Image (cartoon, rainbow, N blue to C red):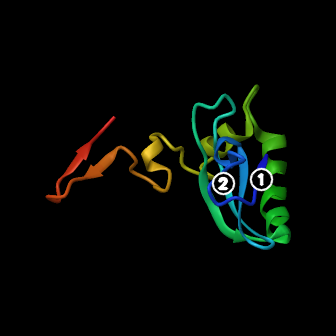
Amino acid sequence: IRMTGCPNGCGRPTLAEIGFIGKAPGQYNMYLGAGFAGNRISKMYKEGVDEEEILAILGPMLQAYATTRQDGEHFGDFCVRTGIIEPTLQGRCFWSTGKENLLETPSGTTQIYW
């Protein structure tokens, strides 16, 4: 878990399986799904959550993780496998919520990039 009040992500919360970036006093953007080994950055799961919401959101997730994870599975991988969050497959698709390998060109065509 990484938490920072810096909107620039100075504490590198997007590299954590659970990360928080301060949005306002007592309000955080919650990020989930980073790879434990640093092979995948997280995605924003919920915007503007407070402490009570964080506990309400993470409690059931951590309970499910504790009871249904696969051998050796880290929490970020669990979040991706169970569909809690989509993986970030390309760094430039950090904000994307799907179809990450599709790129719409200025002419309106769609191309696949790798």
Instruction: Answer with the quarter of the image where residue 112 lies.
Output: top left
At horizontal 38% and vertical 50% (from top left) the residue drawn is 99
Q: Nearer the viewer, residue 73 or 46?
A: 46
At horizontal 81% and vertical 72% (from top left) the residue drawn is 26
> Which percent across, then down, holds residue 72?
75, 26
Instruction: Answer with the quarter of the image where residue 37 lies.
Output: top right
User: Which residue corresponds to mark 1?
Assistant: 3
User: What SS does tag 1 mark?
Assistant: strand
User: What SS does tag 2 mark?
Assistant: strand
Q: Which mark is residue 114?
A: none
At horizontal 61% and vertical 41% (from top left) the residue drawn is 81
> Which percent across, then down, holds residue 8?
62, 55
Q: Which mark is residue 31?
A: 2
> Which percent across, then down, holds residue 76?
68, 41
Of badges 1 and 2, nearer the viewer stands: 1
- Number of other residues with Cα within 10 Å of mark 1, as a class: few under 14, some 14 to 19, many 20 or more: many
Instruction: Answer with the quarter of the image where residue 16 lies.
Output: top right
Left or right of 93 in this view: 9: right
Task: Mark 1 or mark 2: name the one nearer the start of the chain.
Answer: 1
Total number of numbered discs in the rendering = 2
Which quadrant is home to the C terminus?
top left
Is 64 rendered above or below residue 51? above
Q: Amino acid at mark 2?
A: Tyr
Left or right of 92 in this view: 76: right
- Number of other residues with Cα within 10 Å of mark 2, as a class: few under 14, some 14 to 19, many 20 or more: many
